[in-house]
Amino acid sequence: MAGLDKEFDYRVPARLADRVDVGTLVRVDLHGRRVAAWVVAVDVEPPPGVERRPVTRVSSVGPPADLVDLATWTAHRWSGRRASVLRTASPRRNVASLPPARPTRRPDVTVDDLAASALGRPGVTVLRVAPTDDGVAVATAAAALGNALVLCPAVGRARWLAGRLGRLGFRVHLQPGAWSGGPSGGVVIGTRSAALAPTAALAAVAVIDEHDESLQEERNPTWHARDVAVERARRAGVPCLLVSPAPTLAALAVADRAMAVPRARERAGWPAVEIVDRRSEEPGRGGLFSQRVAEVLRSAERPVAVLNRKGRAAMLACASCGELVRTEDGTRLMVERDGGLVAPETGETRPLICAVCTGTSLKRLRLGVTRAAEELARLVGRPVTEVTADAGEVEGAAVVLGTEAALHLDLQADVVVFLDFDQEVLAPRYRAAEQAMGLLVRAARLVGGRRPGSSIVIQTRSPDHRVLRAAVAADPGRMVDEERSVRAAIGFPPAGALAEVGGPGAAAFLAPLAGADGVTILGPRPDGRHLLRTDGPERLADVLASLERPKERVRVAVDPPRA
Ligand SMILES: [Zn+2]
């Protein structure tokens, strides 16, 4: 039932019998209203004495039985409504019937050796590629195996890949538009939702840029296309290839093996990375722009400067030693509140004193994008275009300054400058390091990898952070071990499973878990949200499914990207 997420029994009238199967979209009467629903089982024996009402109408062909099962698994795994997952698995417009299957002609193409060998093994393989890798080699290798499912984060990339494979001679179904084409055979290509698109008997699954956050649904259920793709491949018994320039711990944790392109190929995709260490400067003096960065922005041909400002409290730096003001253990930033310091996530407090040198003169580092753009224009004597979310055209401007949205623009750039990278690597989120590396991958793409004049320049007060050391070495693989031990130390994914529980009913919802074995509840934090932690995703899903929803609203986000 689309609005209710409950199962009801209905009778299938003889006139509709040959059109109703598991997955079919139907209309039924419920309490006098006609509502949309999916058939999730057929040939069900009703309880004795129950008179069932008939299905009123068949609306559309829906997801096949195996995808209805996968949708059920997905809804359970991310503790959400099955109806919302089934909607994703269904065609956007009603489909009367599927076209007949056609034999697939496999074009004679040259297949990349490494991609073919990665896809030639059973189970899940992680392949680390250069940031500039366009995904064609992997998609082609998958398609060459037969009916393939290829996922990537962005619509533009999916369309482009579909075009490339089409020109190579493959039969391609770009999702979500070509929903009904999949079952006829060929390659199904699309973004997140295509993880649940129907295909003919699968031969291979590939996920390109598995690290990209757009592969995860933001609303409940917060399912991740990578994890659904892995489960789908496992159920079909076909190889699954997870590709990324910076593979996530989540991918590595489910992988049977990890591979990487040859070092020279990876290196060629990374521009030179220059670190500008700001600890030696007096905070507040140079403002947002160090002398070195001003120089770069003055002389680069088409520079892009990135400054993420999303309404967070101002960061503080010590005027004596230049270090950022952090918690005693150095892992979290502290902000000024009520005349003292506080770490918003943990509640740790201390007077206005630097933990490194006990200096008491602390300076604010915050500057908004608009004021930064004005200041930059004055500083470099060139016009500056400000870019925020949903930016339009950038016309012939000398310098582009914006939030990370600037990295999503289709523009020519030779240098990307991160004005305040500490805000990324030290963000109060457990995936912060991976997310920061994701930004560097984007920057590397924007400047076209390693070529004369291209570079990434990073202003920081944490030059030894694992993300920066890995980026300078053009080797994201280097941060994996340290990142894994940081997560293991706090029991966060993949060392454990996590759900964020918020809303006015959160405390009542979680109350039955007090003292439960293998379950930890952290919080509530100042914003009222709790974190629920278990040793693994299956256990987490079972625990969440066992809880009664209280009257008051509860919001559950399993493995939330921003926790
Ligand atoms: Zn200090």
Image: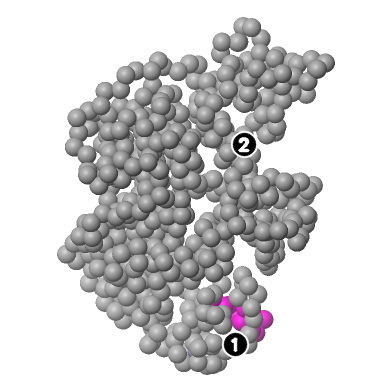
Q: Mark 2 highlights which residue?
A: 82
The structure residue drawn at horizontal position 41% and vertical position 27%, both measured from the top left corner, is 201
The part of the image, by quadrant, that contains residue 152 is top left
Q: Is residue 269 above or below residue 219?
A: below
Q: Nearer the viewer, residue 216 or 548?
A: 548
Q: Mark 1 highlights which residue?
A: 352
Which residue is at 39% across, 56% downward? 247
Side (left or right) of 400 relative to 550: left
Dividing the picture into quadrants, the one containing residue 352 is: bottom right
Nearer-the-camera pick, 529 or 32: 529
Classify 443 as above or below 1: below
Residues at discs 2 and 1 in contact (Cβ within 8 Å):
no
Callout 1: few (<14), some (14-19), or many (20+) C-alpha neighbours within 10 Å?
many
Whole-percent x, y for residue 32 in the image: 77, 21
**Tag 2 secondary structure:** helix
| Residue at the image point whose x is 46% and y is 50% from the top | 254
| Colouring | one colour
Q: Nearer the viewer, mark 2 or mark 1?
A: 2
Q: Which residues are magenta?
A: 333-342
Task: Let me know if residue 444 is in the magenta part.
Answer: no
Q: Amino acid at mark 1?
A: Leu
Main SS of the magenta part reads: strand
Spot occupied by residue 436 in the image (x, y as percentages of width and height): 42, 64
